[in-house]
Image: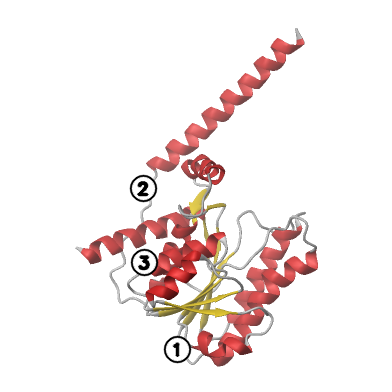
Amino acid sequence: MKFPRLRTFLLAALALFALVYIAGAVTLARKDDAIAVFKKPAATYETIAIFGASGTAGDGILKAALGNPDISRIHVITRRVTPRIEAGVASGKVQMTLHMDYLDYSAVQRQIADADAVYWAIGISSVGVDEKTYGMIHVDFPARFLAEWTHVSDKSDISFHYISSSDISEDSSAMWAREKVRAERTLFELAEGTNLQVIAYRPDYIGPTDEEAHIGQDILFWFFAPIGAAVRAEQIGQAMFEVTTRMSEFENGDKLGTRSIVRYSDAYDRRRILADQ
């Protein structure tokens, strides 16, 4: 008798999960919160820099940048080369610089001084990583960069777009969540009183670009996307560029979750379609 009861319990739990999932997907699909197409004078960001372009999120940002006609020059600062970086170099739009020490940016001063906006996608999983190493990569690397960038840049307005994470809190029991909050707070404070604005992006699951995704990643993306818990890496790039265009609407320290990232990506697509007509 125990097995039929267990089976009934499992089926009931599965049915309840399915109902909640479907209700969430339907609610999200019916929500009409599209962002109006931007028609004001756009912020200029003809020259940008991307850090972390060899990773999942960075590859999507680079793909979006290569397809963005508002961008004429892309500085890719990287430790390793990828096929997309090589293709960008071949197109003439990407200027790649191999760089190994992310606590010292003196070797790339010219490149970063040239940038109107910087898109930061450097990061690692917390699995098997101690707190000191994780903090160095997620806090010290970008903090040192901002100190150098604000020192060498003579641009009147610059913006830094940082990929953080969802579900983070300084009171969290998870080390990585506390460190991501510390990273955001540190970067926001460094920008206060300067010509710099820092925007944090807090995606849930990040689906790789079509060229990089394997079947398991696609399954995860299509499972989470209908309930607003997944975004494609390329969409993050598009959202970042849309936010950069609208920097007058944002303040230093603003944070965008998955749903906002998708909405700004959609606004970017609609603006591009209208511009091409």
In the image, is residue 172 above or below residue 148?
A: above
Is disc 2 in contact with disc 1, using a CB cutoff of under 8 Å? no
First along the sequence among labels 1 and 3 = 3
| Of the two numbered discs 2 and 1 in the rendering, the one whose residue sits closer to the viewer | 1
Q: Amino acid at mark 1?
A: Ser
- Name the residue tied to disc 2: 32
Q: Quadrant of residue 37?
A: bottom left
Q: Position of residue 174 (x, y in %)?
A: 75, 55
Q: Quadrant of residue 98?
A: bottom right
Q: Position of residue 272 (x, y in %)?
A: 29, 64
Cα–Cα gap, marks 2 and 1: 36 Å
Q: Residue furthest top?
A: 1
**Residue in view at x 62 percent, y 20 percent:** 12
- Name the residue tied to disc 1: 156
Cα–Cα gap, marks 2 and 3: 27 Å
First along the sequence among labels 2 and 1 = 2
Q: Position of residue 92 (x, y in %)?
A: 39, 78
Q: Amino acid at mark 3?
A: Gly
